[in-house]
Amino acid sequence: MSEGSFSAWLREQCASEWDAVVAHPFAAAITTGDVPDAAMRRYLEQDFQFVDSFTALLGAAVAAADTFEARVPYGRFLGQVATTEEKTYFHRALAALGGSTEAATEPVTAEFARLMDDVRRSLDYPLIAAVLCVAEWCYLGWASRLPGPPPENWVHREWIELHEGEEFRAWVAFLRGELDRLGPSLDAARRAEVLSVFRRAVELERRFFDMAAATR
C-alpha cells in the first residue's frame, strides 16, 4: 500500500466483488429504467430498512471523527440528505409503487443493518469510515454508468440523481479522503481489520443486489 491510496488499496483487495456490485445487472437496469415495478418496490422497501441504521452511523461518525474538519461534512450530509431528500424520495417512490415502509426485512438486509450497528457501537472511526465509504462509493460506481439519457420513469431517475452529481461525488471524495488520511497511520493489524469490514460491506452490497434481482 502506497501512502495516500488506502481507499484504492481496500477496493483492490476485493476487486471481483466490487466489480460485481458496480456492474450488477440489477443496477444496470435501474440506469436504463428497465427494472419491473415489483422488483423496484422490493428493492426500495429493503433499502429503506437501512435509513435508521445509516443515519445512526452518520451520527457515530460525527462523534468518533478525530478532527473538527471531518465532523462537519458528516453533520451536513446527515441533515441535508440522509434525513430529508432521500427519506422523502423513499416515501414518494414506495407510494407510487404500492410498497410499504414497514415491509418484512430480508436476511441480507438484516445482516447489513447489523454490520452498520456493530460498527456504530464500536465508535471506531476507521471502521465507521470504511462502511460509509463502501455504501456510498459503490453506489456512485453504478449510478455514474448511465448509458444514455436518464430514464423517463422518475422513480429510477431520481434514485440515480441521489447517487450521482457534483455534490454526491464530493461526498464520496471526502469519505475516500478520510480513509486515505487515516491509512498511513495504521499498523498492519489495524489495516487488516479495516479491510475485513470493508470487504464484508462490499460482499453484502453484492448480495443485496442479488436479492433484488431474484424478485419474481
Image: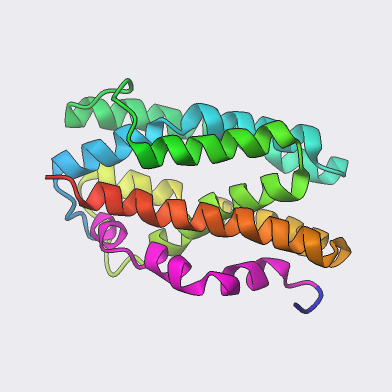
Q: Is residue 169 magenta?
A: no
Q: Which residue is at 60% across, 57% downward?
A: 198
Find residue 101 and report its horizontal and vertical position in percent: 33, 23
Part of the protein shown in magenta: 4-31
103 versus 115 height, above or below:
above
* Direction front: furthest residue: 189
Left of 142 or right of it: where is 96?
A: left
* Direction left: furthest residue: 216
* Direction bottom: furthest residue: 2
Pick the quarter of the image with the N terminus.
bottom right
Q: Which residue is at 75% across, 56% downward?
A: 178
Find residue 97 and report its horizontal and vertical position in percent: 18, 32
Per the picture, the main secondary structure of the magenta-coloured stretch is helix
Q: Which colour style is shown?
A: rainbow
73 versus 104 height, above or below:
below
Q: Which residue is at 56% across, 60% downward?
A: 199
Report the front residue among 148 and 96: 96
Report the front residue among 49 and 170: 49
Q: Which residue is at 75% across, 36% downward?
A: 123
Can residue 172 be seen in this snapshot? no
Pick the quarter of the image with the C terminus.
top left
Left of 58 or right of it: where is 123?
A: right
Find residue 130 and report its horizontal and vertical position in percent: 65, 53
Q: Is residue 19 magenta?
A: yes
Can residue 57 be seen in this snapshot? yes
Find residue 64 and report its horizontal and vertical position in percent: 79, 37
